[in-house]
Amino acid sequence: MGAIKFFINATVLTMDPTLPTAEALAIRDGRIVAVGSTEEVLWCREGESELVDLEGKSVLPGFVDAHNHFAIAALEGFWADCRTPPLQTIPEVQSALRAAAAKAPEGEWVRGWGYHHGSLAERRHPTRQELDEAVPHRPVFLLHFSHHQGVANSRALAAAGITRVAPAPPGGEIARDKAGEPTGLLFERAMAAVERASREGWEARFPEVVASASRRYAACGLTTVQDAAVTPAMERRYAEAEQAGHLKIRVKRMAVSPSGWFDPPGGLAREPSEGGFLKLFVDGGYRCAMRLPQDGAERRSGFLFYQPGELADILVTAWRGGWRVACHALGNWGVEVAVDAIAAALARERSGEGRVRIDHAMFLTLELIRRIRSLGVSVVTQPNFVYDLEPANRRLPPGFLRLPFGSLLNEGVPQAFSSDYPCGSLAPLTGIRAATTRCSRAGQEVSPEERISVRAALEAYTIGAARAVGVGHECGSLEVGKRADLVVLDANPLEIPADRVPELRIIKTLVGGEEVRP
């Protein structure tokens, strides 16, 4: 056995209700072997050991991000950063694409990411002609910050067979001008072919960037994330990275169809890896499926990918094949479809109990929350969306709840936090502030009645997220026998104003007892 390392004179926030706070902990061979007072923990001292005096600093479980896109984040350095801000105009987006094209290997697609049409000075999406002007000689795909829509240039549209007469697939839309020609803007499943082609050629370079991406995540205090869109090809890249020792944090994977993120799943007959997750898109993203009252009637909007009966059949097949399932559903209508399907599937296949969750659930009602609770379904939410995203600020009729962290908590629904990065800000400390202050980047309060406490937010980003990912028995709290995944902060987040939580300095992040250095 290896030497014991002792961390003493600390404020240890364990996320273990039987011992919420301690002074010290000890680790050996990547596992926690003692937690308690400094005196109690030092009783374990024997033979070779190392003593680390933290001088009052705080120790927490490493943060767990239950819905992330690590592979996309790792590769984004090869692509054009078109975030708005800092970019402000379509000419600036064109310039970024032009610069990326100059660095891209011959024959490779040019890909941009992060733009928000509502934040551009022109208040619109770029067109395929504007992308042609920037990069005329190779295919270009510009991905919206939501990852649910994007703009393709003429070469990209041609490569995907998207023409004047091409029909939109179910669950997708091809935007067209008054003459019927594609403008380049594609929604949901309509963008599958161009998104896949713009990404796949770059995935071979994943080994070059996975270690640096791991360190960037660890610098935010993250020790485990779940990549929520992993194709079979990308799964092989991950396996290679793990075998080579390039992954410095733990990345659990969620399978999607090889033909596109939003397509129906394939390969359900294959045996998943231990605790393997399958992702099912129930509704769209930026244009999620909503049902809202309007002028005495009901207005429906957004994209639905499945009807309840169809979705229930897929759930039953997945559970029988050994899969856990995450249902992507943002709008209240999308969540209703997911809940209806889960109820019907559980009536046929009880093995699904505890093996399904709903991710996002941005717009709910109290009735929906109570139905979710009755089914024993957990919800994975994104507190940074309060801080980052304009859609969180849309007006809703009375009775409709926006990112209802407080209501989910009060009703007893198991809740996990995540970032959905790069769709939202990565840092958990920023998300914790958003959940507790309900303030946007612009300083606007967003549904302040849904605030939760800092402790509740910490739990959602540690043990709550670990349970949602299926690894709560291994991490998420500082308990004897669990992995020594932890983060050291310069102060106690429970003893400072909530709006100052992002100012906390992360001193070190340990994964399996080993520090991940920048």
Image (tube, rainbow, N blue to C red):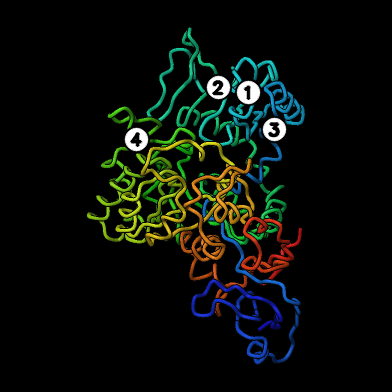
Q: Nearer the viewer, mark 1 or mark 4?
A: 4
Q: Nearer the viewer, mark 1 or mark 3?
A: 3
The percent position of residue 211, horizontal first and vertical second, equals 70, 54
The percent position of residue 141, horizontal first and vertical second, equals 60, 27
Which residue carries the number 2 mark? 159
Estimate the spatial distance between the alpha carbons at disc 4 and disc 3, rounded to whole Å.
36 Å
Image quadrant for the C terminus?
bottom right
Crowding at mark 3 (Cα within 10 Å: few <14, some 14-19, many 20+): many
Crowding at mark 1 (Cα within 10 Å: few <14, some 14-19, many 20+): many
Q: Nearer the viewer, mark 3 or mark 2?
A: 3
Q: Tell me which residue sits at (51%, 16%) in the image.
A: 182
Tell me which label, 1 or 2, sits earlier in the chain. 1
Estimate the spatial distance between the alpha carbons at disc 1 and disc 3, rounded to whole Å.
14 Å
Name the kind of residue labelled 4 in the image: Arg
Q: Are marks 1 and 2 in contact (CB under 8 Å)?
A: yes
Which residue carries the number 4 mark? 291
Which residue carries the number 3 mark? 80
